[in-house]
Image: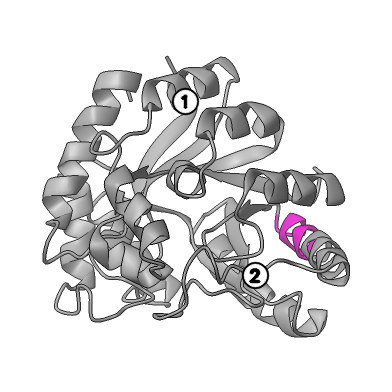
């Protein structure tokens, strides 16, 4: 289905240790995490909170297991802070990823985000950007995109539950306000489905801009409960709203077919933040790996 060597499969460490809730997976070590990734058959990883920030140390640990770094999350605050503050920290993040051989930088605007707030209802409390905030976001992302290009890297924007860019309409607006040469899109199946969108429709609408893919599934009975009981994003994660591909309701075969037909190149990253005490990370990593091989040939 996909051209040989055109795409690679990674998995995010958030299933082992959660960045937003460190108590989830507190006892899981960095070495356990990457060893189990390799054991489950993955080629790469994104960067988690327990990963060493020394490129030499990280390279060594990954090379022993045949893994590479696909990318890492960067929190931008372009709507609420001066651009220069975000740009400075972005450059440090960019340089680290460049040393690790990554080609894309995952960016999400966290101005007024509620994704890290334990008690704020996810849907009722979601931020809605003003015209001024949209303008600041678009202009700032353009600047960050140019900084990424200085290192021959690509900024990929991560739409995310609990932020100002969550819905299909908000994604479309951001794409309209930004230049394709400066801002690309991270396509996240789970966040789209959770937001009530059809991932396949969003994929088709923005296919030329998509340069990085997160493969995440949802449990619809849990996501409906989140809306009904006015749960927060973190409460949703603890309740099991997310799971790996093949364990939820998303039709991934159609998504893979569309991406293959478009000659997509880059990383696919399995990402499903769950409580590792309830969902064994290795078991779910292996389950996702088998499913993806069955439906895509990867």
Q: Is residue 99 left or right of residue 252?
A: right
Q: Nearer the viewer, mark 2 or mark 1?
A: 2
In the image, what residue occupies the spot 68% across and 34% down?
206
Q: Which residues are magenta?
A: 144-151
Task: Tell me, yes or no, if residue 297 can be seen here.
Answer: no
The quarter of the displayed image where residue 25 is located: bottom left
Quarter occupied by the N terminus: top left
x, y (%) of residue 74? 57, 69
* CA distance separating discs 2 and 1: 29 Å
Neighbourhood count class around disc 1 (C-alpha, 10 Å): few under 14, some 14–19, many 20 upward: some
Q: Which is more toward the observer, 209 or 152?
A: 209
Q: Is residue 188 left or right of residue 228?
A: right
Secondary element at image label 1: helix
Residue 135 included in the magenta stretch of the image:
no
Q: Which is more toward the observer, 194 or 188?
A: 194
In the image, what residue occupies the spot 64% across and 54% down?
157
The quarter of the displayed image where residue 226 is located: bottom left
Residue furthest toward the front?
A: 228
x, y (%) of residue 237? 32, 63
In the image, what residue occupies the spot 52% across and 34% down?
199
Residue 150 included in the magenta stretch of the image:
yes
Are the two marked residues, 2 and 1, in contact with CB atoms closer than 8 angstroms? no
In the image, what residue occupies the spot 31% across and 71% down?
18
Q: Which residue is under mark 2?
A: 127
Q: Which residue is under mark 1?
A: 255
Q: Is residue 7 left or right of residue 284?
A: right
Quarter occupied by the C terminus: top left
x, y (%) of residue 105? 60, 58
């Amino acid at each position: 289905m996909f051209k040989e060597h055109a795409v690679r499969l990674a998995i995010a460490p958030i299933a082992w240790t959660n960045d937003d809730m460190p108590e989830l997976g507190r006892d899981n070590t960095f070495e356990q995490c990457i060893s189990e990734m390799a054991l489950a058959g993955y080629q790469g990883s994104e960067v988690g909170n327990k990963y060493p920030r020394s490129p030499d140390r990280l390279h060594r640990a990954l090379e022993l297991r045949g893994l590479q770094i696909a990318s890492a999350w960067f929190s931008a605050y372009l709507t609420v802070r001066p651009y220069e503050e975000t740009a400075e920290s972005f450059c440090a993040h960019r340089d680290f990823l460049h040393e690790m051989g990554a080609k894309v930088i995952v960016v999400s605007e966290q101005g007024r985000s509620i994704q890290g707030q334990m008690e704020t209802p996810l849907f009722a409390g979601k931020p809605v950007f003003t015209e001024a905030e949209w303008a600041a976001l678009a202009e700032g992302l353009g600047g960050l995109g140019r900084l990424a290009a200085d290192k021959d890297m690509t900024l990929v924007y991560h739409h995310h539950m609990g932020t100002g860019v969550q819905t299909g309409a908000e994604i479309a607006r951001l794409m309209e306000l930004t230049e394709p040469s400066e801002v690309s899109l991270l396509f996240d199946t789970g966040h789209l489905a959770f937001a009530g969108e059809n991932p396949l429709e969003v994929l088709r609408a923005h296919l030329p801009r998509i340069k990085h893919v997160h493969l995440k599934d949802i449990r619809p009975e849990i996501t409906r409960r989140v809306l009904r009981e006015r749960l927060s994003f973190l409460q949703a994660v603890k309740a099991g709203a997310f799971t790996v591909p093949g364990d939820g309701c998303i039709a991934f075969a159609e998504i893979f077919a569309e991406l293959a037909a478009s000659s997509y190149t880059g990383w696919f990253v399995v990402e499903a933040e769950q409580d590792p005490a309830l969902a064994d990370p290795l078991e779910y990593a292996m389950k996702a790996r088998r499913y993806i091989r069955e439906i895509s040939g990867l």
